[in-house]
Amino acid sequence: MNRDPLASGVTTDLLDVLIVGAGWSGMYMLHRCRELGLRARVLEAAPSVGGAWYWNRYPGLRCDVESYEYSYSFDQSLQREWVWSERFPSQPEILAYANHVADRYDLRRDIEFEARVNAACFRDDECVWEVTASRIGTRRARFLVMATGALSIPKKTDIPGLDDFGGTLIHTADWPSEPVDFTGKRVGVIGTGSTGVQVIPVIAETARQLHVFQRTPSYSVPAHNRPLTEEDRTRTLERYDEIRHIQRTSAIGTLAKPVAKSAFDLDDAARRELYDAKYGKGLAFELMVAFEDMLINEEANRTAQEYLASRIRERVKDPAVADILIPKEQFVGTRRICLDTGYYETYNRDNVTLKDVVRDPIRRITREGVELASGHIDLDTLVLATGFDAMTGALLAMDIRGTGGVRLRERWSQGPRSLLGLAIHGFPNLFTITGPGSPAVFSNMFVSIEQHVEWIADCLAFMQQHGHSRIEAGEAAQEAWVGHVSEVANATLFPRDKHSWYLGANVPGKPRVFMPYVAGVGVYREYCTNVAKQGYPGFEFA
Ligand code: NA7
């Protein structure tokens, strides 16, 4: 055969591994496959690498994990040569890093860009995945790795009249590549999750008038971002191995760890002092897991809620506006705490108004703007920061069919079921990176991604060594894992946040199933490592 698989149209060329997505997961997976001597290729919808960091280009976007922690650790020379300029990296710098990695490991020659995968079908008789993508047609591979990201499909906005809007409509996850000029414009932003919290202060600087439409407020901590000095860099490099070790064995893949078992091990003054220290240094994750019982005990959590509410009151001049911005009956940490730069202070500006759309609902979007129950607001530009169809959205956007033609959409109609968030019964030779049932979104994604890629690569090597050509998650093991994931979650406050996207609650009609594994990335890693060491119990080989 030997047609060039980069040529458009159907090819019968059989790859060893086909990877969907050229974000952090897909790029590293490709690199590991090459090291194993496997013929691998990546299909990517975007014209370049970077995944979420390619599409989300809105002004103000920064990572909430510190730059030296939010990077690959697999290659000492890579992590030593890349110089981060700021404590919390901006989107352009992160994208530059993604491009650097692609060039450094010469990854692009095996990535087909502008190829959005629509369907993937497992051919039982041949034990081959047949994958179709826009522009390029069909590709065939023995293994399929979904490196499609946990937050890559924007949620369909369910507000009537959106198509009627006559001004400029922008979703933050599909931001134009040219800079957007808000000068002199009347702008509306819907959504106050971490994206809204980041983009709102930037738009407010130039817009004539900014109207923020808030349904659910977020907890936010000032980032205290700053340029990194040579001394910072030297200090990090000196202890990089230790930093990486702590990340891998930690709860959420960062250096954050509890200082005490319970919030009540400290008296009120000492607790406040601790919260002040974390808040004053932009250590949102450290605040979130300050005590072992923070995400388990409602009373412990309330101490943080009250603390953060008091900080909002300090930062917002108008007490009525502050009151709208304070989350009600919402736990601290069951959604990622946001990191902001001047978010609350933005509401002290004369050109910014906050609308509580719970009390004053959006009736519809009109040609001219937004119609609230209380009246109409004229807008030139409407920005949607309304979030994602998280964790399952990207997988279910494709028509994936496993053994006997069974559809993943059918299998997951009552919610996702997966073994370790890595493999799905009925879908042999398919792996998911940071899939539902893994810590994924409840962690520093880099730590979780590297662990998954390495686990999959080790599994492929194991199969090579043992002459296996087929692997499938066993049904009983999968069901046991799904049960364990929900048992762990049920022992925490997470599932009690009924509106969270961790539960799928932000997407109308999506089954309410708590998706991430929240026992901690260290615990999870150990579990996965033991499965591999013991010869993959729970998985079936042929
Ligand atoms: P999020 O965290 O899902 O936030 C989306 C926001 O948009 C949230 O405030 C939603 O309120 C709001 N929203 C969604 N739909 C509507 C409608 N129809 N009307 C009013 N408000 C609405 O997404 P982000 O992009 O901010 O952050 C996602 C993750 O990216 C973040 O956790 C980081 O890890 C990176 P709701 O909560 O649904 O009431």
Image: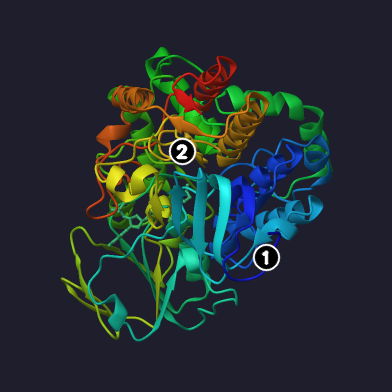
Question: Which residue is most to the left?
Answer: 373
Disc 2 versus disc 1: distance between alpha carbons? Answer: 26 Å
The quarter of the image holding the N terminus is bottom right
Q: Is residue 18 depicted above or below 212 in this figure?
A: above
Is 104 or 417 nearer to us in this picture?
Answer: 417
In the image, 9: left or right of 483?
right
Residue 484: which quarter of the image?
top left
Q: As displayed, is residue 32 above or below residue 119?
A: above
Which amino acid, mark 2?
Pro
Q: Residue type at mark 1: give it.
A: Leu
Precedes in sequence: disc 2 or disc 1: 1
Q: Which residue matches tag 2?
A: 428
Q: Residue at x 62, y 65 (%)?
A: 113
Q: Residue at x 53, y 23 (%)?
A: 528
Residue 15 versus residue 310 in the image, above or below: below
Percent x, y of residue 474: 40, 27
- Residue at 42 percent across and 62 percent down: it is 348
Can you identify the residue that label 1 sits on? 6
Q: Nearer the viewer, residue 217 or 523?
A: 523
- Residue 440 badge: none
Whole-percent x and y of residue 516? 40, 35
Q: Position of residue 189 (x, y in %)?
A: 38, 68
Q: Is residue 434 left or right of residue 9?
A: left
